[in-house]
Image: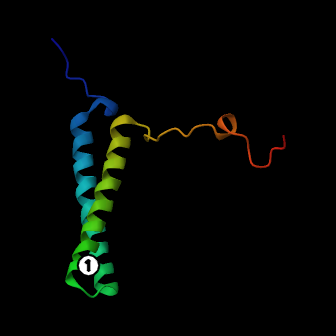
Amino acid sequence: MSENKPIPPEFDLNAKWDACLDLSIRKIAYSSLAGAFGGLLLLRSPVTRWAAVAFGAGVGVGAAYTECNYKYYGVPVHSSPTNVSESSPSPDAQD
């Protein structure tokens, strides 16, 4: 008979999916509310206020995507910068 062994946390996709869904909803809601509040205080036109809400929601989506990517893959994904010292001389270098 086989025993039901618990799934290690790094392989439990259901828990990761639940955490990402919860994180995404909270980030989008909070940043949309911040955009609405900022738009209400700073902007006069209804169109620009809605634009502030949309911008806040976009920031929330981006933040949620980044954190969920970190939860699934364990390391943040960054583009590696090229080594500037090898590709071009520094401005202080003398010939």
Reply above or below: 91 against 53.
Answer: above
The residue that appears at 31% across and 53% down in the rendered structure is: 64
Figure quadrant of residue 58: bottom left
Residue sticking out furthest to the top: 1
Nearest the viewer among 93 and 15 is: 93
Whether residue 95 sits left or right of residue 76 in the image: it is right
Q: Can residue 63 be seen in this view?
A: yes
Reply above or below: 50 against 93.
Answer: below
Nearest the viewer among 68 and 59 is: 59
Q: Mark 1 points at which residue?
A: 48
Q: Where is residue 1 in the image (x, y as percent from the top left)?
A: 15, 11
SS assignment at label 1: helix
Whether residue 44 sits left or right of residue 91 in the image: it is left
Residue sticking out furthest to the right: 94
Figure quadrant of residue 83: top right
Q: Where is residue 7 in the image (x, y as percent from the top left)?
A: 27, 28
Residue sticking out furthest to the left: 1
Q: The C terminus lies in which quarter of the figure?
A: top right
The residue that appears at 22% across and 75% down in the rendered structure is: 50
